[in-house]
């Protein structure tokens, strides 16, 4: 039997600007809900209704959960849906006259938006986390968590209090949202340093995911490659990602999503149509953005594109699902000659790849799950389900690693973003100093210190250095980093004078309001020892 | 540019935007007057950034990178509240951050009083980093070290880690013209990872079963090995061992 662990990790940075009626970067969330999370939930529910067996793991990051359950953002998403419905209706009329080749696709977009509106309001009452919880309760999903603000942990390994808070607060947040303790932990960017498992053990985490090279580069000789999890010396289990199978999807040169018949992401009417027409649906006054209305196929590398044909794309979805299953079965056959047990390996992807970046990705996932269910020799199994079987596992210390370019920390520590660590590390030192000097405060000082903890955690997010590295929304990432650090410094300087800036505090609590039950004392020295 | 929701902004924020928009006397204006003046400006502002020569990003650019949507918004940093962080902190300390097996990043702060002290010396002084290689966190220093000359205006340096599997720490040092040396501060220890297989590559060449188990999940269908320098070193060591 070929056992495969399919893991989707869903994460977005905390972006919430109640001070603006519309805010450009909040669209990251709205695009992900419309194009990935709601369609994914529909697909998974459909499979369940049809009694197709499956069992997969989804990591929902604490910042994503905070945003999905936030009334301000839920209200803004409602506006987003209504605006897009209006645009879809307008697009049908436009296509009838100007672009009849795109009429079917415009009609498809309208139907999808209508389904999203139905699901958002009627099915999930504006909080789609309920959908994930429902699928977990029926045994189809295992929900796990990741670091509180998705900090890339190897670059904070010297700051044990901060690493501990990232993990403990994530678990607390998961319990708040799903009323149960997570068994697994997605390490942001698969960033692992030896010893990290001790923090996970403190929070009763049973397993975590590492990059594909982590076992091979261990000082211990790995016995079964990546085809069985290992037990770290402290008993927490590590599962390595199978790079071979995931690269069939991830490779931006030869991966399935690059097929010429799939929908082209970058041709969007937000950029293509005249301002007079598209103006109300982009950002004020005239900032062109992606609207999600795209009518062209990838075609090739040139900018001369064919019209997108969903029927042609569907044929490719079936072919690519067949090919993925073929590769799983071939791997199983090859391994049966060299492995003493049935293999278990994980294939892990960013959830937002499916539907958002790769439009047909959710159809492909569905096709893969159906095909696996129909075989007799491949099973989808979560890491927890595998561990329950009590297979005899090798004890091994995984090696420092990440799934980023180069396999270490270069993406989050390159020439453009290294400057941030001087400031974030200093803020962490000072946060611990504050927690030690002012432990057990109540009332205003407690709220002031809690806000400092929120700000420093938000500054730790791996998203900011990642965006700076990729040179995408650099201005926004830098602004966010600087503001969180400045907010922290404001608290630090005030507390050093034994003062509380109440006016600022009230505003800051409204602005960055995640982790409502945070306790700044978690940053205090010695909390880890107390815990153990 | 995004038009802010004026009503949601504080007086200080409104004054900041007004100043940026060139409204004179904004520091003394009332909230209502500020909002009125700003709304007039935003209503009149119909100028567009003229960057639409290419309406969309080329299709071959950064496809399917694990990244967020790129928006062409160049004005966000003009919004109020973007703050300047201190260039340095007034505490003499040095930190070492491991980036990969070959490089670490050192950053340091020197308390201004240290420089005052140096300036009072009658001799000339210079600063340098001393990179110490140590066997392990607990073991004694084995004496291997090298120095990097730095300028008193430097505050960070990319530090080469010449040998893998060794622990490193970096000291910020000063030296005077009469040969006297002293240490200002010393960093934490970082350990450059190494891999057991680099010295045992012939085993992987000999043992097909082991080779399949460890390499089949880190290579693509097209036999491209995962992007990681130590894995690449293993491959190179296997090639070398295979030729011998």
Image (spheres, coloured by chain):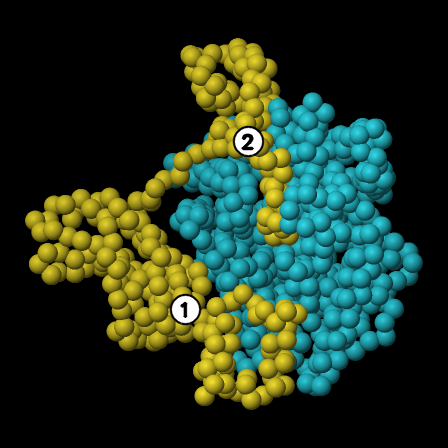
- Label 2 neighbourhood size at 10 Å, few (<14), some (14-19), many (20+)? few
Counting from the top left corner in percent of width and height, residue B227 is at 54, 65
| Label 1 or label 2, whichever comes before in sequence order | 2
Chain identifier for the yellow-coloured part of the image: B
**Secondary structure at numbered mark 1:** strand
| Residue displayed at 52% across by 36% down | A444
Quick one: A341 or B65, which is closer to the camera? B65
Q: How many marks?
A: 2
Quick one: B205 or A411, which is closer to the camera? B205
Residue A466 badge: none
Residue B191 badge: 1
Counting from the top left corner in percent of width and height, residue A278 is at 71, 27
Residue A472 in the figure: left or right of residue A318: left
Q: Is residue A2 above or below residue A529?
A: below
Separation (CA) of disc 1 from disc 2: 47 Å
Q: Which residue is mark 2?
A: B51
| Residue displayed at 65% across by 64% down | A247
Chain identifier for the cyan-coloured part of the image: A
Read off the chain for label 2.
B
Counting from the top left corner in percent of width and height, residue A95 is at 81, 32
Q: Is residue A97 above or below residue A34?
A: above
Q: Nearer the viewer, mark 1 or mark 2?
A: 2
Residue B71 in the figure: left or right of residue A49: left
Residue A145 visible? The answer is: no
């Amino acid at each position: 039997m070929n056992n495969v662990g399919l893991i989707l990790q869903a994460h977005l940075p905390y972006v919430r600007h109640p001070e603006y009626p519309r805010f450009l970067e909040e669209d990251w969330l709205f695009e992900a809900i419309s194009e990935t999370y709601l369609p994914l939930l529909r697909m998974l529910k459909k499979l369940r209704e049809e009694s197709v067996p499956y069992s997969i793991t989804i990591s929902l990051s604490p910042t994503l959960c905070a945003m999905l359950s936030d009334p301000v953002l839920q209200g803004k998403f409602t506006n987003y849906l209504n605006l897009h419905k209006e645009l879809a209706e307008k697009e049908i009329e436009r296509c009838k006259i100007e672009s009849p080749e795109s009429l079917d696709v415009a009609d498809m977009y309208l139907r999808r938006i209508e389904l999203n509106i139905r699901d958002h309001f009627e099915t999930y009452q504006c909080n789609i986390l309920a959908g994930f919880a429902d699928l977990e309760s029926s045994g189809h999903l295992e929900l796990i968590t990741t670091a509180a603000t998705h900090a890339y942990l190897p670059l904070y390994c010297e700051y044990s209090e901060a690493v501990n808070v990232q993990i403990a607060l994530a678990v607390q947040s998961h319990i708040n949202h799903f009323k149960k303790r997570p068994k697994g932990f997605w390490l942001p960017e698969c960033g692992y340093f030896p010893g990290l498992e001790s923090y996970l053990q403190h929070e009763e985490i049973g397993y975590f995911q590492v990059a594909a090279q982590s076992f091979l580069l261990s000082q211990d000789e790995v016995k079964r490659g990546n085809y069985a999890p290992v037990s770290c010396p402290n008993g927490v289990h590590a599962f390595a990602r199978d790079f071979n199978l995931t690269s069939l999807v991830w490779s931006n040169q030869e991966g399935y999503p690059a097929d010429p018949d799939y929908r082209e992401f970058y041709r969007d009417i937000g950029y293509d149509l005249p301002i007079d027409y598209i103006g109300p649906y982009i950002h004020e006054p005239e900032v062109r953005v992606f609207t999600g209305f795209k009518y062209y196929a990838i075609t090739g590398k040139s900018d001369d594109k064919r019209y997108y044909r969903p029927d042609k794309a569907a044929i490719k979805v079936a072919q690519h699902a067949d090919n993925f299953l073929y590769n799983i079965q071939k791997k199983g056959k090859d391994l049966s000659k060299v492995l003493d047990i049935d293999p278990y390996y994980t294939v892990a992807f960013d959830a937002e790849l499916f539907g958002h970046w790769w439009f047909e990705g959710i159809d492909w996932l569905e096709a893969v799950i159906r095909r696996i269910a129909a075989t007799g020799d491949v099973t989808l199994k979560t890491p927890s389900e595998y561990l329950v079987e009590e297979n005899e596992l090798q004890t091994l210390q995984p090696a420092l690693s990440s799934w980023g370019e180069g396999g270490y920390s270069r993406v989050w520590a390159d020439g453009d973003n290294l400057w941030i660590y001087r400031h974030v590390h200093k803020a962490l030192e000072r946060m611990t100093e504050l927690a030690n000097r002012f432990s057990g405060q109540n009332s205003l000082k407690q709220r002031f210190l809690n806000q400092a903890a929120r700000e420093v955690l938000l500054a730790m997010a791996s998203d900011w250095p990642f965006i700076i590295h990729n040179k995408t929304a650099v201005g926004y990432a830098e602004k966010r980093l600087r503001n969180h650090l400045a907010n922290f410094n404001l608290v630090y300087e005030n507390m050093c004078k034994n003062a509380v800036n109440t006016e600022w505090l009230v505003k800051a609590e409204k602005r960055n309001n995640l982790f409502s039950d945070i306790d700044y004392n978690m940053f205090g020295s010695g909390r880890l020892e107390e815990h153990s | 540019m995004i038009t802010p929701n004026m009503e949601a902004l504080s007086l200080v924020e409104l004054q900041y935007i007004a100043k940026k928009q060139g409204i004179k006397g904004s520091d003394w204006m009332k909230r209502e007057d500020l909002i009125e003046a700003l709304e007039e400006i935003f209503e009149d502002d119909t100028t567009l950034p003229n960057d639409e020569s290419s309406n969309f990003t080329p299709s071959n650019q950064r496809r399917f990178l694990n990244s967020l949507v790129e928006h062409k918004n160049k004005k966000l940093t003009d919004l109020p509240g973007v703050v300047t962080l201190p260039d340095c902190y007034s505490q003499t300390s040095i930190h070492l951050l491991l980036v990969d097996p070959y490089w670490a990043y050192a950053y340091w702060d020197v308390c201004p009083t240290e420089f005052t002290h140096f300036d009072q010396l009658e001799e000339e002084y210079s600063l340098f980093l001393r990179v110490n290689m140590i066997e392990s966190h607990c073991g004694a220093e084995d004496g291997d070290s090298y120095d990097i000359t730095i300028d008193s205006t430097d505050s960070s340096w990319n530090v080469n880690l010449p040998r893998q599997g060794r622990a490193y720490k970096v000291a910020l040092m000063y030296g005077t013209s009469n040969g006297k040396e002293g240490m200002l501060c010393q960093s934490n220890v970082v350990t450059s990872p190494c891999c057991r297989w680099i010295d045992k590559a012939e085993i992987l060449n000999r043992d097909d079963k082991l080779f399949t188990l460890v390499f089949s999940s880190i290579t693509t269908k097209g036999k491209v090995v995962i992007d990681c320098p130590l894995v690449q070193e293993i491959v190179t060591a296997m090639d070398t061992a295979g030729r011998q």
